[in-house]
């Protein structure tokens, strides 16, 4: 099978949906995952006419549920025997109403389950399938909010979990370097999505950073943090 097999978490809307569409339009087979099978099926069906020679396959996956992740990995193993691209896009809780001195730590813990432990769980579980690929890529969709160089006091749950995701990116890149797995974090920028709100850049511009990292050549960077293909400070 020569077709690239990609999996995108949080693929039913926003940057995730557009990333699915763009990867499939390149001829890839893309697994569009969502917590609801019905939502995944509806969005995949809606994209079918826009992706040319590519294919969009719906797959239920809740990144906070270990059993759900295991079932998804079993499905990918049975169907394809490998995974070429893992895009950890699912994220929650852009907590603009909080400051660290008064932050609700239950909100922080909940954000960490999706924004940090979710990608960690996905990479751990899909590692054998990535290692079975000839050109494996992992893209962690992060945010400049997680950059220590520019971090302020706002959005503490979101910012801290994205900073931790950046650290995880560096660690997995180091561990997987000998396996040829390129692991990078990308910031799509402020994008006009349900989470980002009105006024941001178009979704397509944000998704392009993700697609860039997902389609890097074998000699491309690993362990980096990028927006629009250019490095960002940690």
Image (tube, rainbow, N blue to C red):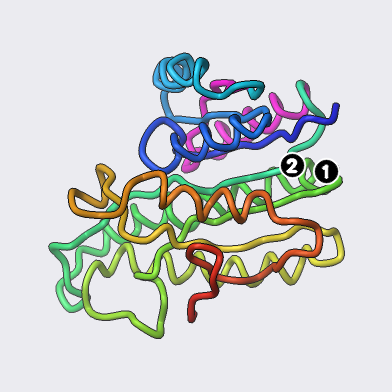
Image side of residue 118 versus residue 93, left or right = right
Q: Label 2 belongs to which residue?
A: 84
Q: Is residue 185 magenta?
A: no
Look at the picture and state if 206 lies above or below 178. Answer: above
SS of the residue at dot 2?
loop
Q: Label 1 belongs to which residue?
A: 133
Give the image location of residue 171, x and y in percent.
Answer: 66, 71
Look at the picture and state if 151 lies above or below 136. Answer: below
Residue located 58% across and 67% down the image: 168
Give the image location of residue 34, x and y in percent.
Answer: 45, 30
Image side of residue 39 versus residue 186, left or right = left
- Nearer to the camera, 101 or 225: 225
Q: Residue furthest bottom?
A: 149
Task: For the residues labelled 1 and 2, say whether their Cβ atoms are less than 8 Å apart.
Answer: yes
Residue located 85% across and 26% down the image: 1
Residue located 46% across and 47% down the image: 207
SS of the residue at dot 1?
loop
Look at the picture and state if 231 lies above or below 216. Answer: below
Q: Is the residue marked by circle 2 packed among few (<14), some (14-19), or many (20+) residues within 10 Å?
A: many
Give the image location of residue 167, x and y in percent.
Answer: 55, 72
Q: Is residue 63 magenta?
A: yes
Point out the stretch of residues depicted in magenta: 55-78
Tell me the distance, in whole angstroms, between the alpha carbons under discs 1 and 2. 5 Å
Label located before the other in sequence (1 or 2): 2
């Amino acid at each position: 099978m020569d077709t690239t097999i990609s999996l995108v978490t949080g693929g039913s809307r926003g940057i995730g949906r557009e990333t699915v569409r763009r990867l499939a339009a390149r001829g890839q087979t893309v697994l569009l995952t969502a917590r609801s099978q019905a939502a995944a099926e509806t969005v995949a069906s809606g994209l079918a006419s826009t992706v040319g020679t590519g294919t969009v396959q719906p797959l239920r996956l809740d990144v906070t549920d270990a059993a759900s992740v295991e079932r998804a990995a079993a499905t990918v193993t049975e169907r394809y025997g490998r995974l070429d691209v893992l895009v950890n896009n699912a994220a929650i809780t852009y907590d603009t109403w909080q400051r660290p001195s008064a932050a609700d730590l239950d909100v922080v813990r909940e954000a960490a389950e999706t924004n940090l432990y979710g990608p960690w769980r996905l990479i751990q579980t899909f590692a054998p399938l990535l290692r079975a690929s000839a050109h494996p890529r992992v893209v962690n969709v992060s945010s400049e909010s997680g950059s220590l160089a520019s971090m302020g006091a706002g959005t503490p749950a979101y910012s801290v979990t994205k900073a931790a995701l950046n650290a995880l990116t560096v660690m997995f890149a180091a561990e997987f370097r000998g396996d040829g797995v390129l692991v990078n974090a990308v910031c799509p920028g402020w994008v006009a999505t349900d989470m980002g709100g009105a006024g941001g850049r178009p979704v397509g511009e944000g998704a392009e950073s993700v697609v860039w990292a997902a389609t890097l050549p074998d000699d491309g960077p690993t362990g980096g943090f990028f927006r629009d293909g250019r490095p960002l400070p940690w």
